[in-house]
Amino acid sequence: MTLQLEKPKGAMSVNDFAVWAGIGRTTAWKEIREGHLRAVKVSTRTIIRFSDAEGWLAARPQLECRGKPSKQLLGSLP
């Protein structure tokens, strides 16, 4: 079962960002701590603007395939 979030209008919580990005909460907090993901504080809440989330995703390095694809990957292709 895949959990999908609607595109937020402005911002989302760190937990919602982790679901949106398909990463764990610990990884999300690590990205914030290391300065790769911009987050803002609103009172006691830490939120991530949707535009910052999209920028973070766009800045991730592209996966490079080296050599032949594995049989496992080939089996999952339509």
Image: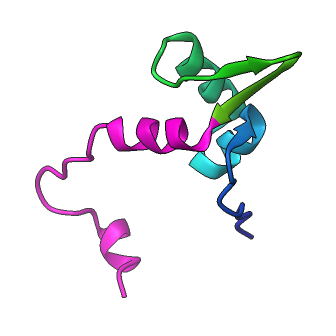
* Residue 74 image position (x, y, % from top left): 30, 74
Query: Is 66 rendered above or below residue 76?
Result: above
Question: Residue 32 or 30: which is nearer the viewer?
Answer: 32
Q: Quadrant of the N terminus?
A: bottom right
Query: Is 1 rendered above or below residue 47?
Result: below
Query: Is 77 rendered above or below residue 61?
Result: below
* Identity of the residue drawn at 53% across and 40% down: 53
Name which quarter of the figure residue 28 lies in. top right
Looking at the image, which residue sits at the far right?
Answer: 44
Q: Find the magenta span and give its range.
A: 49-78
* Identity of the residue drawn at 50% across and 11% down: 34
Looking at the image, which residue sits at the far bottom?
Answer: 78
* Identity of the residue drawn at 47% across and 45% down: 54
* Residue 6 image position (x, y, % from top left): 70, 64
Colour style of the rendered protein structure? rainbow
| Left or right: 75, with 27 as reference point | left
* Residue 16 image position (x, y, % from top left): 74, 44
**How many numbered dots are placed on residues in this image?**
0
Question: Residue 38 or 19: which is nearer the viewer?
Answer: 38
53 in magenta: yes
Q: Quadrant of the C terminus?
A: bottom left
| Left or right: 9, with 73 as reference point | right
Looking at the image, which residue sits at the far left?
Answer: 67
Name which quarter of the figure residue 23 lies in. top right
16 in magenta: no
Question: Residue 2 or 8: which is nearer the viewer?
Answer: 8
Query: Is 8 rendered above or below residue 49?
Result: below
Question: Residue 12 or 24: which is nearer the viewer?
Answer: 12
